[in-house]
């Protein structure tokens, strides 16, 4: 319990605001039980040194949580692929069928 209090004080005093700060403090105080997203944000906040040098991409691609890092540049810049005409046609057909089924009910 003393370790958590020490971590909480360090995060509250030296940490900058950023995704994960409130989740970490809430968990350490015991006011929240974080869900998966909150837990990842809190861990990244702690691991990145409480974002003392600013909230930015850590660049640690070996970390298993890196794909979910709140400031991961690759995650933030979603690259959309262009669908082929066959895929677009199949998607449109499924949508027409779904709408027709809804209207029939």
Image (cartoon, rainbow, N blue to C red):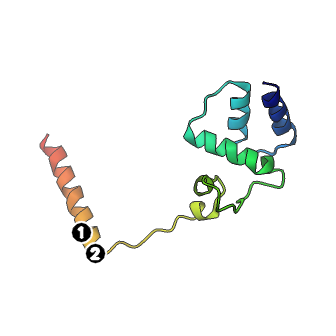
Judging depth in this view, the residue of 52 and 5 nearest the camera is 5
Residue that badge 2 annotates: 85
Q: Is residue 29 above or below residue 14?
A: above
The answer to whether any part of residue 11 appears in the image is: yes
Neighbourhood count class around disc 1 (C-alpha, 10 Å): few under 14, some 14–19, many 20 upward: few
Q: Is residue 78 left or right of residue 66?
A: left
Q: Quadrant of the N terminus?
A: top right
- The residue located at (60%, 33%) in the rendering is 34
Residue nearer the viewer, 24 or 100? 24
Q: Confirm or deny contact between disc 1 and disc 2 (CB under 8 A).
A: yes
**Residue 89 numbered mark, or none:** 1
Query: Image point 26% across, 63% down: which residue?
Result: 91
Taking 105 as reference, is 57 above or below it? below
- Is 23 on the left-hand or right-hand side of 77? right
Relative height, residue 104 to residue 27 (above, below) = below
**77 shown above or below 46:** below
Say which element carries label 2: helix
Tell me the element at label 1.
Answer: helix
Mark 1 → mark 2, Cα distance in angstroms: 6 Å
Residue at image position (59%, 65%) is 74
Drawn side of residue 16 relative to residue 93, left or right: right
Numbered mark located on residue 60 in the image: none
Q: Residue at x 82, y 43 (%)?
A: 15
On the image, the x and y values in percent for residue 8 come to: 80, 33
Residue 18 in view: no
Quadrant of the frame with the C terminus: top left
């Amino acid at each position: 319990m003393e370790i958590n209090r020490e971590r909480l004080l360090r995060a509250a005093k030296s940490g900058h605001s950023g995704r994960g700060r409130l989740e970490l403090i809430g968990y350490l105080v015991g006011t929240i039980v974080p869900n998966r997203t909150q837990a990842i944000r809190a861990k990244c906040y702690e691991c990145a040194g409480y974002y003392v040098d600013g909230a930015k991409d850590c660049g640690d691609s070996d970390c298993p949580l890196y794909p979910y890092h709140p400031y991961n540049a690759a995650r933030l810049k979603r690259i959309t692929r262009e669908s082929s005409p066959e895929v677009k046609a199949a998607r449109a057909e499924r949508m027409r069928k779904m709408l027709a089924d809804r209207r029939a009910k």
